Image (cartoon, helix red, strand yellow):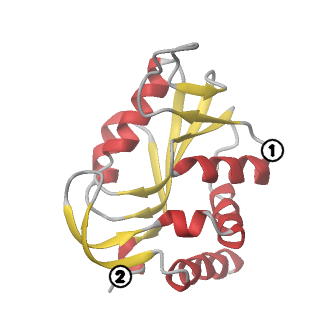
Amino acid sequence: MEDSKSLERLKQELIDCEAVKFGKFTLTSGKESSFYVDMKLASTNPKILKLIAEEFSKNLPDDIDFIAGMELGAVPLAVALSLETGIPYSMIRKSERKHGTGSRIEGISEGRAVLIDDVATTGGSNIESVKALVDEGVEVSMVMVVVDREEGAQEKIDPFNVHYKALIRISDLVN
């Protein structure tokens, strides 16, 4: 029962911090929406960030080597989850660097990883991140997001044989 209470608390915190906004928005996918999930409001609040890390940690597979998150939104989540679990994390750049090592992945890039993200809509960013990790020889065992907007992300990820887990569905926040 405690699990469901803490998840309910997280949902309420997302509502209370006004992470769900209503109006006219263009999403990363290019789609228009009448609501927007501004997870930066939640992930920059230490109390909510800790709740997210605690909920993520309950769902982690035992045999992962690192946590991965794409810049920008997933990085504080990866850091918080790393601090919560003691598991190292890596950051995935949105594009290749033209200087230094030229790598898209900063941090560990070997072994098995869990990819985390703040919000999933169509799954495009998640697939891009999975491909970046796989290109480096990483085995991605799971994609875990805080909020799934229920617009096809899971269906898009399924063909990659990667387990998908959303802590919260948008239908739990927007009625």
The numbered disc on residue 174 is 2
Q: Circle 2: is it few (<14), some (14-19), or many (20+) Cα within 10 Å?
A: few
Q: Position of residue 119 (x, y in %)?
A: 43, 58
Q: Is residue 171 visible?
A: yes
| Residue visible at 30% across and 52% down in the picture | 28
Q: Nearer the viewer, residue 155 or 69?
A: 69
Q: Position of residue 148 (x, y in %)?
A: 39, 62
Q: Circle 1: is it few (<14), some (14-19), or many (20+) Cα within 10 Å?
A: few
Q: How many marks?
A: 2
* 165 relative position to 3: left or right: left
Q: Is residue 64 visible?
A: no
- At numbered mark 1, what does the secondary structure look like: helix, strand or loop? loop
Q: Position of residue 115 (x, y in %)?
A: 53, 42
Q: Amino acid at mark 2?
A: Val
User: Where does the C terminus fall, quadrant-wise?
Assistant: bottom left
Rendered image quadrant of residue 33: bottom left
Q: Nearer the viewer, residue 132 or 18?
A: 18
- At numbered mark 2, what does the secondary structure look like: helix, strand or loop? loop
| Residue visible at 34% across and 70% down in the picture | 36
| Residue visible at 43% across and 34% down in the picture | 94
User: Where does the N terminus fall, quadrant-wise?
Assistant: bottom right
Disc 1 to disc 2: CB gap under 8 Å: no
* Residue for badge 1: 86
The numbered disc on residue 69 is none
| Residue visible at 55% across and 26% down in the picture | 105
* 66 relative position to 121: left or right: right
Q: Is 44 located above or below residue 164 in the figure?
A: below
Q: Amino acid at mark 1?
A: Gly
Q: Position of residue 98 (x, y in %)?
A: 45, 16
* Separation (CA) of disc 1 from disc 2: 34 Å
